[in-house]
Image (spheres, rainbow, N blue to C red):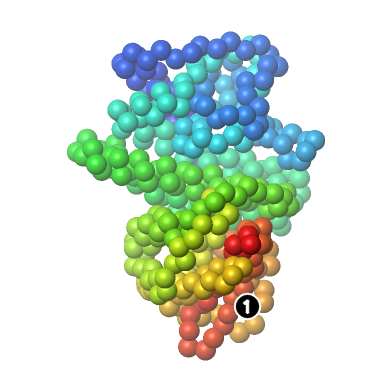
Amino acid sequence: MNDPTARASFVSLLKSELQQQRVTPLILEYKSGDVIFAEGGPGDGLYAILDGLVRISAFVSQSSSHPLCEFASGDFFGEMSIINQVPRSASAIALRDSQLLFVSREQVMDLMERSPPLVFALLHAFSNRMRETNSNFVQTMLESERLSLLGSFARSIVHDLKNPLSIILLAGDAAASERASASLREQAKKRMHQQVERLTHMLNELLRVSEGSTQHSVEPVNFAAYIAEILDETREELASKNVRVEVQTAVPDLVFPLNSRRLNHVFFNLFGNAADIMPDGGVITIRFQQTEREIMTEVEDSGPGFPPGIVEKLFTPFFTHGKASGTGLGLSICKNITEDHGGRIWAKAEAGRGAIFCFTLSLGN
């Protein structure tokens, strides 16, 4: 299932491209026990291991660090910084004397724009790594005898990551095609960036819920522009399922504090649930209402609606209904996100209508 040569192939191709483009990377030496980078540090590039052994670990609480994986010669790590410039999500420590090749984010992005095969190699390696990460997580949970929670959590990860990974691989195929135009490659690159960011924030949201964290940063965001971006980002994925989105009311054109990356998850989840419940296609209708203190968003699908007795249970963690691969984590996460924004979320069941979800966001007044 996993390709053991995927990461080595990417490193080999990366070194070849560096030579062809006459790019000089840094060669760094670390002693056993040296910290290569720390969790929370700047994500400024990736590392390829020329010789040595490196352990990746992350804090699971304020005082406890958990080892995630180990990488040996021919492997690479730190790749998430290529796509989005966010702090490191884990720490890297040399387990023995190691020699590493460091390539900055700017250098890798330049090489990827010049070499579609390098893009495809990274996607292939990244896809395999995501599968391995999920497999390792499952094994760890089994060993700790948390079987019930493991089953639900693992199914949620697989279900939620399936669509973004599929889009990434399709975009990678398009970008790697010899007949691809420059505009097609640019579009494919944009889609890959969007989906990897989506994956990153989905995983961060799962970790946030598991740790019970409510801390998040907000910044002034134009809500109308934000909604336009959400609709643009989801249009193609929904169209592939014969689902379209209609906005029935004007989107409030005002600026107020949001964490747009976290709020994305609410829209992705509600749209995804609607598409799942309408396997033959349908319409998602969005409406907005504004008061002095908040904005309410209503999302309605043209599906069969809610069966009796489940509306009150929808936001309970691990409660699911009607989806073989669902676990109920999605709506529970949506509840946490809206509440962290000073709002609330609820569902409405009305005769003759599809599923209706409403959520509010505080304007911070």
Residue 293 relative to residue 125: left or right? right
Residue 16 relative to residue 321: left or right? left
Q: Which residue is located at x 40 percent, y 43 percent?
A: 192
Q: Is residue 348 above or below residue 167?
A: below
Question: Looking at the image, which residue sits at the far right?
Answer: 63
Residue 227 in sight from this viewpoint: no
Q: Nearer the viewer, residue 297 or 264?
A: 297
Residue 214 in sight from this viewpoint: yes
Q: Amino acid at mark 1?
A: Val
Q: Which residue is mark 1?
A: 311
Residue 82 relative to residue 114: left or right? right
- The number of numbered badges drawn on the structure is 1
Picture coordinates of residue 261, whole percent (x, y): 53, 50
Q: Nearer the viewer, residue 142 or 339?
A: 339
Picture coordinates of residue 357, whole percent (x, y): 55, 73
Picture coordinates of residue 55, whole percent (x, y): 64, 25
The quarter holding residue 111 reads top left
Q: Would you call the spot at circle 1 few (<14 residues within 10 Å), some (14-19), or many (20 or more)?
A: some
Q: Which residue is located at x 46 percent, y 21 percent?
A: 103
Q: Which residue is located at x 42 percent, y 56 percent?
A: 225
Picture coordinates of residue 283, whole percent (x, y): 39, 73
Q: Is residue 181 above or below residue 225?
A: above
Q: Secondary structure at mark 1?
A: helix
Question: Looking at the image, which residue sits at the far bottom?
Answer: 351
Tell me the quarter of the image containing the C terminus.
bottom right
The quarter holding residue 38 reads top right
Q: Nearer the viewer, residue 6 or 228?
A: 228
Q: Which residue is located at x 58 percent, y 10 percent?
A: 29
Residue 283 relative to residue 254: left or right? left
